[in-house]
Amino acid sequence: MEGFHRLEWMDYYVTEKAPGVYLLSNDGEVVLEIGRSDIDVGQELKALVSTVRGIDSKYAYFWFSYANSPFEAFNLHCKLWHRFRRDNFDTHPRPPQGESWPCPVDGCQFNMNNEI
């Protein structure tokens, strides 16, 4: 995983329309939010931070990775959620509606709770 980038560089790095995952941080070290898009990670990421850019922004840094498919984006989202999760994070990532993909992390309670 390559490091975080400053928000003002988002247009430079995020150039493709593709599924993917992202992390947001206020200091480039502590992950405050983890998310994904099954269609266009750039659009999702820009929508999240476009209203908060500037001095008072909750986030100052981002990291992202494109995925080849919604399935791959879901798998990456799960792995990142397990790696960086904290008490303030939402519940375990869910697959897209209509899909019943299991979490790729061994022993994950999500798979057992959802009878996957």
Image (cartoon, rainbow, N blue to C red):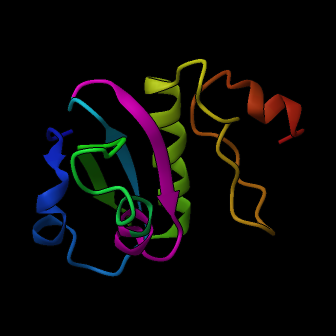
Which is more toward the observer, 112 or 3? 3
Q: Is residue 35 left or right of residue 93?
A: left
In the picture shown, does residue 110 fall above or below 12? above
Q: Residue at x 59, y 30 (%)?
A: 89
Residue that protrudes farthest toward the front in the picture: 56
Which is more toward the observer, 89 or 38? 89
Which is more toward the observer, 94 or 54? 54
Which residues are drawn in magenta?
29-46
Which is more toward the observer, 30 or 98? 30
Q: Residue at x 47, y 42 (%)?
A: 34
Q: How many marks?
A: 0
Q: Is residue 68 visible?
A: no
Residue 113 at x, y percent in the picture = 87, 31
Q: Residue at x 42, y 33 (%)?
A: 32
Q: Is residue 44 left or right of residue 55?
A: right
Residue 68 at x, y percent in the picture = 39, 69
* Magenta span includes 30: yes
Q: Is residue 52 left or right of residue 54?
A: right
Residue 14 at x, y percent in the picture = 22, 69
Q: Is residue 81 visible?
A: yes
* Quadrant housing the C terminus: top right
Residue 39 at x, y percent in the picture = 50, 76
In the picture shown, does residue 42 fall above or below 115? below
Residue 17 occupies which quadrant of the picture?
A: bottom left
* Quadrant housing the N terminus: top left
Residue 107 occupies which quadrant of the picture?
A: top right
